[in-house]
Image (spheres, rainbow, N blue to C red):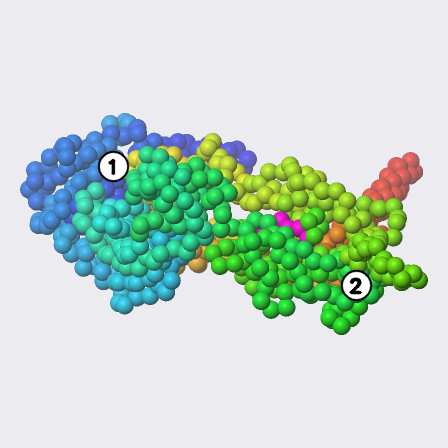
């Protein structure tokens, strides 16, 4: 029996060896495209079932006898045919009508490595006339939709083609228009049909042509015409524009931030470099309306144009910023025991004045308003609030977030806190607050002399309060917009100050003072691009990404590589982005889960991404292609209930991202050593609700639980191993006993 099985096995092995050469010679010839539009390229492929394709030889033929199978001719390599001696034949058609092609058969003669020759069955090609392409594409819903122009006012449509909007000269506009993918129709894809969106921007009689998803800054007051045009090509043949959407933008005059005089004769430039187009000539002494700035240039509105003038040509910085208020100085009597609070305040800065309604307010240590009829009490601390208004033509300086950014002084040397005045425009109204030290006693009134002699005049003392003598206890560093200082923790007297220093701002982070930690340097626009590699930014362009914030720098259009083949995709030569998938491409979808947005990062919708062509789908079957953005915008901050604090300030943070909310940061309102707002007491441990102590975090508890569970598992394993060892020992001993017996 064993011998018979062995013989049978040998026979099976021999049979397999005999069959192998036959299967290796089998092959088939496939026609990838049978129906295309004239102007496209027909692709025919021959594939052996097994073996290396390159080991076979090929010759494509056509039958000039129209199916008679008697007049086969080799396909030549010329302007119309390529690859006649390869497994991939391409037929380059011209636009127009191809009558009679459906009756012309093609075949491929394939020779195997052993010399065996086989021919494919006849292949017939149907070429549709080019004139039917556009009507069919219209019927299938191709064209432009939802034109977008951001930073405009009231974008709306009169019909499905023409749109209107309003904008301001000098404001950057972002432009984009949607379209349907050609991949939705295999016959269009196989015909090498391509739709590319161009943007034609016409301003001041000049038209600029750029790609979809671009930015543009209008430089004239008047009309701006934005045309989204969809160029149609087939097999490299230009068929003109398939669809057009137009947005007519009315461009208005921008708001003036300040005015300045030209220091010398100069030119208004279109862009921020000296060799740029000159929009207008500016004579020395001309008044310029400054609407912004960009590096070493001011953005200027002049004579109906918005352009750029070098800062060095507009005079000194002080002259150029003459309409901006960068510092304020006020004088107000210090609280004295027994005296009534005064609303008499002298504004030393000529460019501003007291706010027209109740500009001066006094509050006590409990935050209670001190009425005009009340009297200051000895030893108490009082806070004054002063509202200032900018005079006509002037404005207070602000930072990028719109908060006041200027320095101030009360009574010459006392640094106040400068904040936004409730709901007022911080460029027009600000609030100064300062908490005076312990209120001194009222000066003693001298007894009248007993003599009848006329007393000699004495120096007035009512305005010269007597401060109890004590040793000053300096506070930690406290901060204002321009400098930091120390004050006495007992009486509040100003002790020492110095300008902020150190720190460096980035494109995402403000620069902080190395001494006090105050953010005094604004976020810059100076990105640090990673020039070591290009990163694809969609199908439109690639860019160097900023190492800090990921911004797109040095954006350039994709550089197409070789055309896509049956097995190879067309990619960008610079960044590798897949411009056209392989022609027999099958989507390989990966599930991308929903990512919730936060205050610091955008989210994404649930979707499916193809690893081979970067196409996105809403379903796992790849039937619902996503045409819109998958990005979910940032969330707004949600204010936490608890206060964070340090020795000088208290604030609230965001519940979601724990970011400190600057608008909530205020100085402690101390009463008998305790803040009436946040309940901070001098000497308490400093905490921030944005950071939970490690010993109380859920994560820590979870880790502790995991550690406890791990110990339990270890003990159980050890117990099982011990039991197994005991059992094994008992069995061995019993066997030995039986054997001995």
Q: Quadrant of residue 223?
A: bottom left
Q: Looking at this view, name the residue that lies furthest to the left.
A: 65
The magenta region covers: 405-410
Q: Which residue is mark 1?
A: 88
Is residue 340 in the magenta section? Answer: no
Q: Looking at this view, name the residue that lies furthest to the front.
A: 453
Q: Which residue is mark 2?
A: 365
Q: Residues within 10 Å of mark 1 (few under 14, many from 20)?
A: many
Q: At which x and y percent is residue 150?
A: 39, 56
Q: At which x and y percent is residue 545?
A: 47, 39
- In the drawing, does residue 662 fall left or right of residue 554? right
Numbered disc in front, either 1 or 2: 2
Q: Residues within 10 Å of mark 2 (few under 14, many from 20)?
A: some
Q: Nearer the viewer, residue 549 or 45?
A: 549
Q: Nearer the viewer, residue 147 or 305?
A: 305
- In the drawing, does residue 627 fall left or right of residue 689? left
């Amino acid at each position: 029996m064993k011998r018979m099985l062995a013989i049978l096995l040998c026979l099976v092995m021999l049979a397999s060896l005999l069959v192998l050469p036959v299967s290796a010679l089998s092959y088939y010839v496939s026609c990838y495209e049978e129906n295309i539009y004239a102007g496209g390229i027909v692709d025919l492929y021959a594939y052996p079932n097994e073996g290396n394709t390159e080991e076979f030889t090929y010759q494509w033929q056509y039958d000039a006898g129209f199916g008679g199978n008697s007049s086969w001719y080799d396909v030549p390599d010329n302007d119309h045919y390529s690859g006649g001696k390869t497994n991939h034949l391409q037929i380059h058609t011209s636009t127009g009508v191809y009558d009679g092609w459906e009756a012309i058969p093609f075949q491929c003669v394939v020779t195997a490595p052993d010399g065996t020759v086989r021919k494919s069955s006849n292949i017939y090609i149907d070429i549709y006339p080019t004139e039917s392409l556009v009507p069919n594409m219209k019927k299938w819903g191709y064209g432009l939709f939802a034109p977008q122009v951001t930073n405009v006012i009231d974008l709306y449509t009169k019909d499905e083609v023409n749109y209107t909007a309003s904008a301001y000269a000098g404001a950057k506009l972002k432009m984009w228009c949607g379209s349907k993918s050609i991949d939705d129709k295999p016959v269009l894809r196989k015909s090498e049909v391509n739709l590319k969106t161009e943007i034609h921007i016409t301003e001041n009689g000049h038209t600029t042509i750029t790609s979809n998803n671009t930015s543009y800054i209008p430089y004239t007051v008047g009309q701006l015409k934005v045309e989204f045009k969809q160029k149609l090509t087939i097999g490299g043949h230009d068929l003109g524009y398939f669809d057009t959407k137009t947005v007519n933008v009315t461009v208005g005059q921008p708001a003036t931030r300040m005015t300045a005089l030209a220091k010398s004769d100069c030119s208004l430039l279109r862009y921020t470099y000296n060799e740029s187009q000159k929009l207008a000539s500016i004579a020395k002494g001309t008044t310029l309306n400054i609407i912004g700035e960009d590096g070493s240039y001011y953005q200027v509105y002049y004579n109906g144009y918005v352009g750029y003038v070098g800062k060095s040509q507009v005079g000194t910085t002080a002259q150029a910023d003459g309409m901006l208020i960068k510092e304020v100085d006020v004088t107000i009597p210090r609280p004295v025991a027994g005296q009534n609070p005064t609303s008499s305040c002298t504004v030393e800065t000529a460019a501003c004045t007291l706010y027209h309604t109740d500009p001066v307010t006094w509050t006590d240590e409990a935050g209670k308003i001190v009425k005009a009829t009340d009297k200051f009490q000895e030893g108490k601390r009082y806070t004054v609030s002063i509202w200032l208004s900018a005079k006509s033509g002037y404005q207070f300086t602000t930072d990028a977030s719109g908060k006041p950014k200027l320095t101030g002084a009360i009574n010459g040397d006392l640094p106040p806190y400068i904040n936004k005045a409730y709901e007022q425009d911080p460029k027009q109204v600000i609030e100064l607050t300062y908490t005076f030290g312990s209120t001194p006693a009222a000066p003693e009134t001298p007894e009248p002399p007993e003599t009848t002699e006329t007393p000699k005049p004495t120096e007035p003392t009512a305005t010269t309060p007597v401060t109890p003598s004590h040793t000053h206890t300096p506070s930690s560093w406290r901060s204002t917009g321009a400098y930091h200082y120390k004050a006495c923790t007992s009486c509040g007297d100003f002790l020492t100050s110095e300008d902020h220093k150190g720190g460096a701002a980035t494109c995402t982070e403000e620069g902080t003072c190395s001494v006090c930690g105050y953010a005094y340097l604004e976020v810059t626009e100076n990105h640090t691009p990673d020039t070591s590699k290009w990163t694809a930014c969609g199908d439109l362009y690639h860019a160097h990404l900023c190492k800090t914030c990921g911004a797109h720098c040095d954006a350039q259009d994709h550089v197409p590589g070789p055309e896509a083949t049956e097995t190879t995709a067309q990619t960008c030569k610079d960044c590798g982005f897949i411009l056209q998938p392989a022609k027999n491409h099958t989507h390989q979808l990966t599930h991308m889960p929903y990512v919730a947005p936060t205050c610091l990062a955008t989210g994404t919708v649930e979707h499916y991404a193809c690893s081979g062509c970067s196409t996105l789908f809403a379903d796992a079957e790849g039937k619902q292609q996503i045409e819109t953005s998958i990005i979910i915008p940032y969330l707004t901050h949600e204010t936490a209930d608890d206060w964070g604090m340090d020795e000088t300030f208290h604030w609230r943070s965001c519940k979601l991202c724990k970011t400190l909310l600057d608008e909530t940061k205020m100085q402690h309102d101390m009463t008998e050593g305790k803040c009436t707002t946040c309940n901070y007491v001098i000497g308490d441990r400093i905490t921030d609700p944005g950071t939970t102590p490690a010993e109380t975090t859920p994560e820590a508890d979870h880790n502790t639980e995991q550690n406890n569970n791990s110990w339990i598992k270890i003990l159980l394993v050890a117990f099982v191993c011990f039991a197994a060892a005991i059992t094994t020992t008992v069995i061995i001993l019993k066997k030995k006993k039986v054997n001995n017996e």
